[in-house]
Image (cartoon, rainbow, N blue to C red):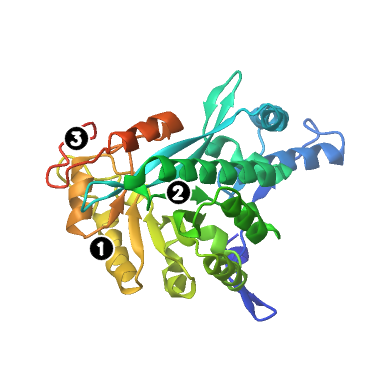
Amino acid sequence: MKSVAAPFMLEGKEVFTSVSVGIAISNAANYELADEILRDADTAMYRAKSLGKSRYEVFDADMRASVMARLQLEMDLHRAIERHEFSNFYQPIISLAAGEIVGFESLLRWNHPTRGQLGPEEFIAVAEETGLIRELGWWNLRESCRQMSEWRSTYPAYSDLTISVNLSPKQFLQPNLIEDISSVLKEFALPAAALRLELTESTVMGDPSGAIGMLEEIKALGISLAIDDFGTGYSSLSYLHRFPLDTLKIDRSFISGVGDGKYSEEGTEIARTILPMASNLHLDVVAEGVETGEQLDLLKKLNCKYGQGFYFSKPLPATDAASLLAKKTSWHPKSFSAASGHS
């Protein structure tokens, strides 16, 4: 697996790959046909993919039930799109210097009829594997832009408000992506500068040269670009300057160890590295997952510009997010006394 993960050159381009491996162990008591062991190895392989890829799994009987549950989820997902069971929640992004809302991240939710509200981590992978991601991603982008256009019009004090929308790897590779984005902006008369598209490191590092071309096309529209969960692929730091980015979003894992007045040593050192580097590259930084005053103090000491997380607000339905704007909610930068202490 390590050998496969090593980068290699293909037609002059550096390519990064990963592998998911499923293993089934055969003996006469378990299997009668070769197809049966191949089926179970395939089941184990899908289990490996669902746990984050770049790993292996050995088949056990419990996996079969998991596969059946996945098939049910796939069928439910088809119906969910037809029945309009999806909605967007919005988490505010805060200027740490001013304590004011500067934008929102749009987060997709599935209002499942029997399982309740599901986050994207529970269904996006299935949507990608089944090809439903195009329709689902298109809905998410349109609704996010429609909502932002409405807010900017309704609340003049927030005329520079931005909306951040996540692009999955399959969405990023869609051939009509540029046309789709352009048509949505035109439909809702939303300035391109109001939209920020977020991609993970793994999305752009799979084919860095190809990604650069697509990112440059998106940038040419006037849209800003962010790398989400930055730091989880820390080896890609050396490639950062190659991409036409505007923002880095530091993964929550690097500040989650802050507590009881003590900072996570590893997370702090990584943040100390990332923030000056981002400044030198003229990139803004958003710290994700801010949950405590200790974390906030650390970020302010390190001159981090923006933050989001439960310390300020959980992801909210559109009506509740609009209430924050209507009340001109702010978190006083001198005190930031509590997550609920906004005015």
Q: Position of residue 181 (x, y in %)?
A: 60, 55
Pointer 1 local density, CA inside 10 Å: few below 14, some 14–19, many at least 20 = some
Q: Which residue is mark 3?
A: 338
Farthest residue toward the top?
Answer: 114
User: What's the residue type where badge 2 is placed?
Assistant: Ile
Q: Which residue is mark 1?
A: 272
Quadrant of the image occupied by residue 311 = top left
Residue pictured at 59% horizontal, 44% vertical: 142
Query: In this view of the protein, which residue sits in the foreground, 127 or 283?
Result: 283
Query: In this view of the protein, which residue sits in the foreground, 330 or 191?
Result: 191
Q: Is residue 113 left or right of residue 159?
A: right
| Tag nearer the camera, 1 or 3 | 3
Real-space Cα separation, disc 1 to disc 3, in angstroms: 25 Å
| Tag nearer the camera, 3 or 2 | 2
Farthest residue toward the right?
Answer: 33
Residue pictured at 53% horizontal, 43% vertical: 146
Q: Earlier in the sequence, mark 1 or mark 3?
A: 1
Label annotation for residue 47: none
User: What's the residue type where badge 3 is placed?
Assistant: Ala
Query: In this view of the protein, which residue sits in the foreground, 269 or 274?
Result: 274
Disc 1 and disc 3 in contact, CB within 8 angstroms: no
Label annotation for residue 163: 2
Real-space Cα separation, disc 1 to disc 2, in angstroms: 27 Å
| Tag nearer the camera, 1 or 2 | 2
